[in-house]
Structure formats: C-alpha cells, structure tokens
Amino acid sequence: MAYAVVAHYRCEPDDAGLVRDALLKMREHTLQEPGNLAYVVHADAGEEAAFTLYEQYVDRAAFDAHTASEHFAEHVIATIRPRLTARTVWFGEVI
C-alpha cells in the first residue's frame, strides 16, 4: 500500500529563500529515488515563509530509505530543520 506524507513548514522570512532552495534540491533528488511516487513542494500563497510538502512512496520502507539518504541528511536535517519555527508532519496510507 502506498505511503503518504504531508508536511507543513514555517520559518523566519529571512530564511525563506534558503529553505525554498533546499526543498527544491530535495525534490530533484527525491524524484529519482526508486520508491518515490510524488514529491510536490508548495509555497503557501498567503505567507512568504511557509511551505507544504506532499510526498508519496510505494511503501513505508521506501519512505524509510528516503529519510536515510545522504540528500535527506544534507538538505533536510542540516539545512531546513534548524531554520524552522514550526513543523507538523502527517503520515498515512493511500486508499
């Protein structure tokens, strides 16, 4: 069963460009992962420093491989997360 992730990120306006660029780099890498089905980055229309991600993987194992990747460590763990002021993540199975 496909595995989905929806993440909402907020950061300071001064960090928005850096977070946006890192998310776009993540999209490039993630779309090449064999278990990835979708990785969509949204910039919230009403707030400059807010982003929503929709990700879909063939299964939970593919998502786990994604979070263990070098590009996840570089862009998400080292670059994005330290700059976030809020982060919520939802996980679900596609039906």
Image: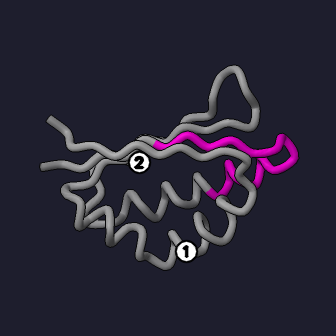
Q: How would you rate the neighbour count of disc 1 (Cα within 10 Å): few for under 14, some for 14-19, many for 20 or more?
A: some
What residue sits 58% from the left and 60% below the top? 25
What residue sits 53% from the left and 43% below the top? 88
- Asked whether, in this view, residue 43 is left or right of residue 1, the answer is right
Out of 94 and 90, give the one closest to the viewer: 90
- Residue 56, image x and y in percent? 31, 48
- Could you tell me which secondary element the residue under label 1 belongs to? helix
Check residue 18 for magenta coloring: yes
Q: Gap in Å between the C-alphas at discs 1 and 2?
A: 17 Å
- Residue 13, image x and y in percent? 84, 40
Q: Which residues are magenta?
A: 7-22
Residue identified by numbered label 1: 73
Q: Amino acid at mark 1?
A: Ala
Q: Nearer the viewer, mark 1 or mark 2?
A: 1
Check residue 19 for magenta coloring: yes
Residues marked 1 and 2 touching at CB (< 8 Å):
no
- Identify the mark at residue 33; answer none if there is no mark: none
The quadrant in which residue 49 appears is top right
Q: Amino acid at mark 2?
A: Tyr
Residue identified by numbered label 2: 39
Q: Quadrant of the C terminus?
A: top left
Q: Earlier in the sequence, mark 1 or mark 2?
A: 2
